[in-house]
Image (cartoon, helix red, strand yellow):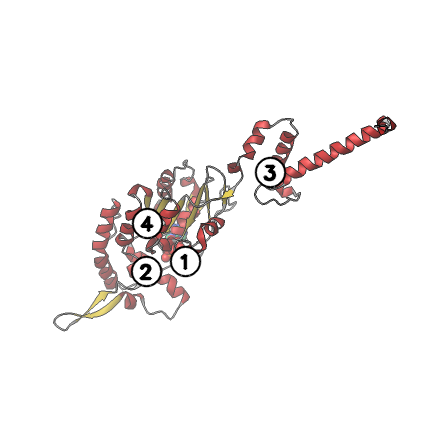
């Protein structure tokens, strides 16, 4: 212990300062380590909010202040995390599912995967970890969402969705099945210009009893089959109560988006944020578009593939299709408890 008096006061003070700086450096690094990934975050002006929270943690670790804030930040749900969806847009193809999701994204409490994930139909074998990783990070109180219209007609989807979360909320956009079929056909024809006429695919010749030929609706053609909404709805209702499934009118989503979005926000338990002040009708496009918002600084419409002009269809074929769908629509109104009043 002889060496202690040998140290001058000045040397001891220098050592003290050095140790203190070392301690500060250690504490700062501890704060900068991402709690989930254990990687160091580099300083950048864009990360101002990160530094704000880091400074709070730093102060708290030093025992200065912000103790309560620090404790709050320590809770895992204050850090945005990827979660399995709380709500799904499960269908129906070509009924306005993209519009619904884009409108919902205006809500600060909604975070949705940008593209269709196709987990419950194509990638179920990849497991829930894979699915969760496709989701955007959300904060506690925010809703995680995804839309894949093909879930509606995937036979195993209701069981799989139920296995993920029996309390999940399901949204289904439906539209007059005749217009839906034409929209579906228009999309295919835009990719394959050599596609036969709609009328030739939707109607097939059938021989009737007395040897005559009569054209009947081809219910096996996917654009026609998909418009029989009663069958998939029955399958979903076997797993989920009607109160967990919201049916949205594709027609009203176009003529009165604010009204339909109020129903959606209510169903999802969100505060009413998306109102008529978010929309304007773009007469060139013939559809409602979005006014500038917090998330987008300029007004914008959905892309070119949404709201295409449809080819002229022979009114006789249209009438045949209407007759074909009528009993299925009635069944659908009965099951859903809503009369959509399609012609
Ligand atoms: N606001 C707005 N802007 C543009 N389009 C709108 C809008 N609201 C509803 N729609 C209708 O949405 C139809 C496309 O439906 P989906 O988004 O479900 O298509 S898809 O299944 O995802 O391919 C699309 O069908 P088409 O008109 O045949 O292109 C539109 O009729």
Question: Which residue carries the number 1 mark?
Answer: 122
**Residue 62: in sight, yes or no?**
yes
Q: Position of residue 155 (x, y in %)?
A: 32, 55
**Marks 4/1: CA–CA distance:** 29 Å
Question: Which residue carries the number 2 mark?
Answer: 182
Label 2 neighbourhood size at 10 Å, few (<14), some (14-19), many (20+)? many
Above or below: residue 76 compared with residue 64: below
Identify the image quadrant of residue 277.
top left
**Marks 2/3: CA–CA distance:** 49 Å
Question: Which residue carries the number 3 mark?
Answer: 49
- Nearest to the observer: residue 58 or residue 38: 38
Considering the numbered disc 2 on the image, is that residue within a helix, a strand or a loop? helix
**Marks 3/1: CA–CA distance:** 38 Å
Q: Position of residue 120 (x, y in %)?
A: 39, 53
In the image, is 79 to the left or to the right of 104?
A: right
Of the residues under marks 2 and 4, which one precedes in the sequence?
2
Q: Residue furthest bottom?
A: 211
In the image, is 72 to the left or to the right of 319?
A: right
Question: Which residue carries the number 4 mark?
Answer: 251
Give the residue drawn at x 22%, y 59%. Answer: 324
Of the residues under marks 4 and 1, which one precedes in the sequence?
1
Badges 2 and 3: C-beta atoms under 8 Å apart? no
Question: Is the N terminus in the top left, top right, bottom left or bottom right quadrant?
Answer: top right
Quick check: is the Cβ at mark 3 less than 8 Å away from ligand 1?
no
Label 4 neighbourhood size at 10 Å, few (<14), some (14-19), many (20+)? some
Quick check: is the Cβ at mark 2 less than 8 Å away from ligand 1?
yes
């Amino acid at each position: 212990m002889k060496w202690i008096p040998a140290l001058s006061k000045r040397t001891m003070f220098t050592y003290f300062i050095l140790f203190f700086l070392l301690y500060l450096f250690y504490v700062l690094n501890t704060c900068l380590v991402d709690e989930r990934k254990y990687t160091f975050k580099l300083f950048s002006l864009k990360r101002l909010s990160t530094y704000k929270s880091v400074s709070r943690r730093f102060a708290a670790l030093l025992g200065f202040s912000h103790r309560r804030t620090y404790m709050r930040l320590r809770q895992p749900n204050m850090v945005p995390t990827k979660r399995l969806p709380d709500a799904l847009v499960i269908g129906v193809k070509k009924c306005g599912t993209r519009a619904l999701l884009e409108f919902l994204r205006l809500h600060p409490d909604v975070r949705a995967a940008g593209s269709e994930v196709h987990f419950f139909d194509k990638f179920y074998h990849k497991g829930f970890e894979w699915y969760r990783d496709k989701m955007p990070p959300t904060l506690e109180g925010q809703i995680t969402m995804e839309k894949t219209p093909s879930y509606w007609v995937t036979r195993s989807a209701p069981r799989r969705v139920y296995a993920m979360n029996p309390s999940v909320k399901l949204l289904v956009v439906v539209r007059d099945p005749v217009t839906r079929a034409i929209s579906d056909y228009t999309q295919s024809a835009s990719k394959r210009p050599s596609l036969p006429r709609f009328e030739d695919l939707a109607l097939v010749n059938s021989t009737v009893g007395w040897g005559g030929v009569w054209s009947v609706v081809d219910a096996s053609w996917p654009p026609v089959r998909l418009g029989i909404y009663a069958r998939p709805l029955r399958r979903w209702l076997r797993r989920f109560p009607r109160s967990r499934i919201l049916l949205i009118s594709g027609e009203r989503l176009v003529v009165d988006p604010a009204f339909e979005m109020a129903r959606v926000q209510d169903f999802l338990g969100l505060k009413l944020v998306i109102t008529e002040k978010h929309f304007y009708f773009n007469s060139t496009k013939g559809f409602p578009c979005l006014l500038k918002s917090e998330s987008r600084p300029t007004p914008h419409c959905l892309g070119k593939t949404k709201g295409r002009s449809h080819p002229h269809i022979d009114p006789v074929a249209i009438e045949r299709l209407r007759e074909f769908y009528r009993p299925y629509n009635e069944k659908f109104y009965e099951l859903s408890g809503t009369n959509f009043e399609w012609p």
